[in-house]
Image (spheres, rainbow, N blue to C red):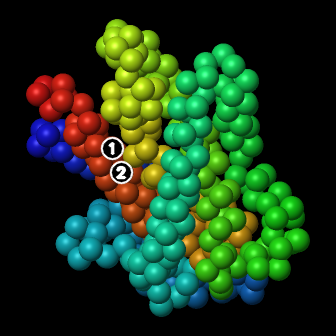
């Protein structure tokens, strides 16, 4: 297990380094000026702002200084769009909201997708199987920015206790989390169905059935753990994808998570904000994949011995 953890940590460091390097030069290649506004800014004022934020230096020096500040001071820099605000402060304030939304969405996705996949496998090639897979395919094909407005119009508007958008009530998390969970539930349903069908065709399952072991006991005691391994493999990237991909849903429902800062960083060419979010997302993705690998090792004795 220690070897797996070290390997994942090294892979994460390399991937995050390459990702931030690419984004660093890519965002600076976008046409425009991060200090441009509705009012015309004088060349002298722009030059003073660029000097203050270190943008007047050559790109290699800016790149070196960026990593130097992160490694020595843990500083992501100042936001160019929100004057006087640290990028680290913006992330620390908005991440708990995105995390809360992501955890609930993942829990809903697991609660819907895994049972749906199990039912589809138990009733293979019957109407229950076809219905479950049609629902799963719809969850894969219909994207979140389509589901969000549909839920706002068809669910939130008729119900007085649900807001169309906002983050003021406890109930305001319901629609965004349901919107986010559909894609995860769809993939989990298909993966669970495939894993369960493979396990149910094994000889030891046939032997258990021949001995008269109840179906529920076969599923829970013998088939569930190996059948869920493909789903567990997917859960790590899925959780990170929910957190990183929730900015579309957050903007639809006006959720004050990290998504709003990502959109603001792109539209206002806030280099430091975009880079800070990309770095944070990359580390989060690595941690999620590591936890997924550890869960697989704990579930499969063969992986522990190897």
Q: Which of 33 and 262 is in front in this view?
A: 262
**Residue matched to label 1:** 292
Element under disc 2:
helix
Q: Distance between the residues labelled 1 and 2?
A: 6 Å
Residue 141 shown left or right of residue 270 in the figure: right
Residue 253 coordinates in the image, percent (x, y): 71, 70
Residue lying at 39% horizontally and 39% vertically, measured from the top left = 232
Residue 287: x and y in percent read 31, 53
How busy is the neighbourhood of tag 1: few (under 14 within 10 Å), some, or many (20 plus)? many
Apparent side of residue 217 relative to residue 268 in the rendered image (left or right): left
Determine which quarter of the picture holds residue 275: bottom left
Q: Please give left or right for residue 91 compared with residue 171 in the image.
A: left
Residue 190 visible, this orientation = no
Q: At 37% from the left edge and 73% from the top edge, which residue is drawn? A: 76
For mark 2, what is the residue? 288
Q: Please determine whether, in this image, residue 126 is positioned above or below residue 228.
A: above
- Residue at the (71%, 46%) spot, across then down: 143
Q: Which residue is drawn at 36% across and 51% down?
A: 288
Circle number at residue 235: none
Q: Farthest residue in the front direction? A: 212
Quarter of the figure that contains the C terminus: top left
Q: Is residue 206 above or below residue 17?
A: above
The answer to whether mark 1 and mark 2 are in CB contact below 8 A is yes
């Amino acid at each position: 297990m220690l070897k797996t953890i070290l390997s994942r940590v090294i892979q994460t460091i390399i991937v995050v380094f390459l990702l931030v390097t690419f984004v660093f030069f890519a965002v600076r290649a976008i046409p425009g000026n991060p200090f441009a506004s509705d009012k015309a800014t004088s060349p002298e004022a722009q030059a003073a702002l660029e000097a203050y934020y270190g943008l007047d230096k050559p790109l290699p020096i800016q790149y070196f200084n960026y990593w130097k500040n992160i490694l020595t001071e843990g500083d992501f820099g100042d936001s160019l769009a929100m004057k006087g605000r640290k990028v680290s402060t913006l992330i620390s304030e908005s991440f708990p909201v995105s995390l809360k939304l992501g955890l609930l969405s993942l829990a809903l996705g697991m609660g819907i997708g895994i049972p749906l996949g199990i039912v589809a496998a138990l009733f293979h090639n019957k109407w229950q199987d076809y219905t479950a897979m049609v629902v799963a395919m719809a969850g894969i094909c219909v994207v979140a920015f389509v589901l969000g407005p549909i839920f706002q119009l068809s669910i939130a508007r008729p119900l007085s206790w649900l807001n169309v958008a906002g983050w003021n009530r406890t109930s305001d998390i319901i629609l965004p989390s349901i919107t986010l969970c559909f894609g995860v539930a769809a993939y989990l349903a298909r993966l669970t169905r495939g894993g369960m069908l493979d396990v149910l065709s094994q000889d030891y399952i046939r032997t258990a059935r021949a001995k008269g072991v109840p179906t529920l006991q076969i599923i829970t005691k013998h088939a569930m753990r190996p059948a869920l391994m493909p789903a567990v493999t997917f859960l790590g990237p899925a959780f990170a994808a929910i957190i990183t991909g929730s900015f579309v849903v957050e903007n639809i429902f006006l959720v004050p998570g990290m998504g709003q800062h990502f959109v603001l960083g792109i539209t206002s060419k806030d280099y430091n904000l975009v880079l800070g979010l990309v770095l944070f997302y990359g580390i989060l993705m690595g941690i999620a994949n590591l936890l997924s690998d550890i869960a697989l090792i704990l579930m499969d004795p063969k992986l522990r011995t190897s």
